[in-house]
Structure formats: structure tokens, C-alpha cells
């Protein structure tokens, strides 16, 4: 049996532990043998429908996804940064995206769950939720996380923890001691002068470091699967798409049957995909990770209009893509049953 990973002592690890242990974090019992359906989407960053609004090109795919999930009885879990409140107030977002808000609201109070991120952290304050969000959406509170206690016919399998993923970073928990006035002043400087900061969603090296920190924490917790957003990069079973492609290439190169036409064709496809992926998303600090402890939904603001997310349906976890335009059906990238994932964790 491999040694148990040593729990890291970092700001990210401490904040994730706090959310996991916090009695205020909602807990749901989930038995893999009982029917259930959850759709998990993150990082919409809905803005003012101006040039800075990255959600505009993804709106058709997002609408198609929500209509699909609503009509099939899914619970919609929005995993933070749903509105871009660092750049404008919620009233501007609501004015420009009233139809999207109505579509989200059509899930009803029993099938609509909100978790806040760093760019919509206004919803940390219950009074703001009551005054601004609740009149438009079926929500009374917005939490920092959601915990599933997973069983199989009554036998405990482990825990699935959903968070946005900004925990422990500079502009979230570590700045909470500062006044809201100081934070708003910084945001105004951002808007006025275009100040930018390096974040895991924009910098590949910080993204790799952040994914590593999230994985290290999750892998050190007993039988825990962490699902987050924040970095805008999908991660399945602790591996990025590039790492998955490279692993498949390595396996094919070592498989023999060098003359097989199917193998040669697939190797050519992999080389092309790996080259393209490296150009689009240069890897940095992406060290190998062995346990299926960390998953990331990706985001709903890809430049090509696609969105990615996760589904949890009857015990099966999936990473899916909804193509740009909203007319093509979703694509399932990966899927695995929670029984298998927790078995591999053990």
C-alpha cells in the first residue's frame, strides 16, 4: 500500500480544511444506488454585455445546457464567479442577462444551488443576497461549499466536496480582514486604470501551482474527492487534458504493433492534438498526480464559445463539453462511477 500523503500546511490547505469541517457547510446524503442528477457549472462571469464581457460568446451553449438539465430534472449547482461583480454591479448584470437569470430561476428552489467565488463574493453577505439576488432567483443563501456524504447501500464510500476553488488566495480569505471599502477601492482602480493581476485563471504557471495545491490537499484527506472551478481549466481525475493525451501517446508508443494502421493514425492525431494544446495552454508546474482526488469543471467563458462542466448522475461523474452555438449535443469527455473512483482512492 502506498504511503498516506502528508497533509500540506498552506493557506489553501487551511482554508479548504475549514470549509470541509465547517458546520455551516451544507451536507447532503448521496447514495450511489439512489437516483440523483446534479449539473455543476462554474465561472460564467456574466458581465455588462460589453467588450470586456467574456460570457457573451458562450451564452448560446450555456442556454442549451441549462434547458437540457432543467427539462431532465437535474439540480443546477453554480460553483462561483457566476456574475462578474469586480467590474460592475449586479444591477448591470441583471439588466443585460435577465433572460439567463430567468432560465436559471426556472429550476426552482429545490433544484438551484449557489456557491460563491471570488468575483461574486458580494453573496458572502446574507443581506445582499436577500436584497439583490433573492428577488430574481430562488435562493435564500449562498454558501462557500457543498459536501456530499457518499454511501453505497448504506456503506460509507467517502466525501465529495464542491467549492469554487479560490480558498486561501490573496483576494479571498486572506483579504477578508480588510474592509469592504478597501476592496471596492481596489476594484475601482482596476476598472479605471486597467490594472491587472496574475491569477490562476490567466497565468499558466500559477494555474499549475494552484492545481497542485488543490490536489495535494485533497489527496491527503481520507477518501475525499474535490470538485472546483476558478482556474478555468478542466481537470479529470487529477490530470489535465494535455496530460491525458500525453499518457495515451506514451501507452501507444510502448504497445508494440508498430505497423498497425489504426495505431499510426491515432498517434498522428495525438501528436497534432498535443502540439495544439501546448500552444493554446502552455504547461507550467504541471507535475504528475496519481490519485483521482481533484477534479475541475473548467469554465463557461472559453474564447471559442464552448463551455465545460460536470454531471453527477446516479453515481456516475462526468466531464462534459457543450459546443459553441448551442445547437450541437453535449460531448462526454470522461466518466467514471464513484464506486470506482473511491476504490482507487483507497
Image (spheres, grey):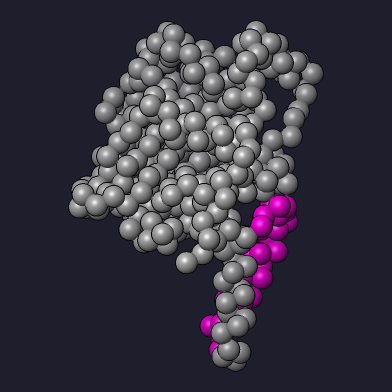
- Image-based side of 155 in relation to 209, left or right: left
Residue 261 horizontal/vertical position (percent): 56, 86
Q: Which residue is drawn at 77% across and 23% down?
A: 194
Q: Is residue 84 above or below residue 161?
A: above
Q: In this view, does 74 lie above or below 338?
A: above
Q: Residue at x 42, y 22 (%)?
A: 142
Q: Nearer the viewer, residue 62 or 174?
A: 174
- Image-based side of 66 in relation to 144, left or right: left
Residue 38 horizontal/vertical position (percent): 33, 42
Residue 95 horizontal/vertical position (percent): 50, 16
Q: In the figure, residue 190 lies in which quadrant?
A: top right
The secondary structure that most of the magenta stretch takes on is: helix
- Image-based side of 167 in relation to 170, left or right: left
Q: Tally the marks.
A: 0
Q: Which of 213 and 221 is in front in this view?
A: 221
Q: In the figure, residue 301 lies in which quadrant?
A: top right
Magenta part of the chain: 260-287
Is residue 199 in view? Answer: yes
Residue 277: say if magenta.
yes
Is residue 78 in view? Answer: no
Q: Which residue is drawn at 74% across and 34% down?
A: 198
Q: In this view, does 287 lie above or below 140?
A: below
Q: Residue at x 38, y 37 (%)?
A: 147
Q: Quadrant of the C terminus?
A: bottom left
Residue 129: say if magenta.
no
Q: Nearer the viewer, residue 29 or 298?
A: 29
Amino acid at each position: 500500500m502506498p504511503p498516506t500523503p502528508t497533509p500540506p500546511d498552506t493557506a489553501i490547505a487551511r482554508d479548504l480544511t475549514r470549509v470541509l469541517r465547517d458546520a455551516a457547510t451544507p451536507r447532503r446524503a448521496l447514495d450511489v444506488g439512489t437516483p440523483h442528477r446534479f449539473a455543476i457549472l462554474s465561472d460564467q462571469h456574466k458581465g455588462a454585455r460589453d467588450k470586456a464581457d467574456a460570457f457573451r460568446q458562450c451564452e448560446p451553449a450555456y442556454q442549451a445546457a441549462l434547458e437540457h438539465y432543467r427539462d431532465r430534472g437535474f439540480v443546477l449547482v453554480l460553483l462561483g464567479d457566476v456574475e462578474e461583480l469586480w467590474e460592475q454591479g449586479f444591477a448591470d448584470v441583471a439588466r443585460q442577462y435577465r433572460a439567463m437569470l430567468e432560465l436559471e430561476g426556472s429550476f426552482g428552489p429545490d433544484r438551484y444551488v449557489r456557491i460563491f467565488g471570488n468575483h461574486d463574493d458580494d453573496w458572502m453577505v446574507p443581506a445582499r443576497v436577500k436584497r439583490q439576488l433573492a428577488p430574481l432567483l430562488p435562493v435564500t443563501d449562498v454558501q462557500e461549499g457543498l459536501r456530499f456524504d457518499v454511501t453505497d447501500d448504506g456503506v460509507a464510500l467517502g466525501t465529495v466536496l464542491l467549492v469554487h476553488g479560490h480558498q486561501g488566495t490573496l483576494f479571498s480569505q486572506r483579504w477578508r480582514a480588510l474592509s469592504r471599502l478597501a476592496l471596492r477601492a481596489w476594484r475601482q482602480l482596476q476598472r479605471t486604470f486597467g490594472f491587472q493581476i496574475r491569477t490562476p485563471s490567466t497565468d499558466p504557471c500559477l494555474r499549475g501551482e494552484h492545481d497542485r495545491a488543490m490536489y495535494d490537499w485533497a489527496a491527503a484527506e481520507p477518501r475525499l474527492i474535490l470538485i472546483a472551478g476558478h482556474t478555468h481549466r478542466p481537470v479529470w481525475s487529477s490530470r489535465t487534458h494535455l496530460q491525458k493525451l500525453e499518457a495515451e501517446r506514451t501507452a501507444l508508443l510502448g504497445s508494440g504493433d508498430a505497423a498497425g494502421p489504426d495505431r499510426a493514425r491515432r498517434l498522428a492525431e495525438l501528436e497534432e492534438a498535443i502540439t495544439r494544446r501546448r500552444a493554446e495552454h502552455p504547461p507550467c508546474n504541471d507535475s504528475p498526480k496519481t490519485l483521482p482526488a481533484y477534479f475541475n469543471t473548467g469554465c463557461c467563458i472559453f474564447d471559442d464559445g464552448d463551455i465545460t462542466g460536470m454531471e453527477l448522475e446516479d453515481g456516475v461523474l462526468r466531464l462534459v463539453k457543450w459546443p459553441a452555438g448551442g445547437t450541437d449535443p453535449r460531448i462526454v469527455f470522461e466518466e467514471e462511477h464513484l464506486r470506482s473512483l473511491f476504490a482507487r482512492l483507497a
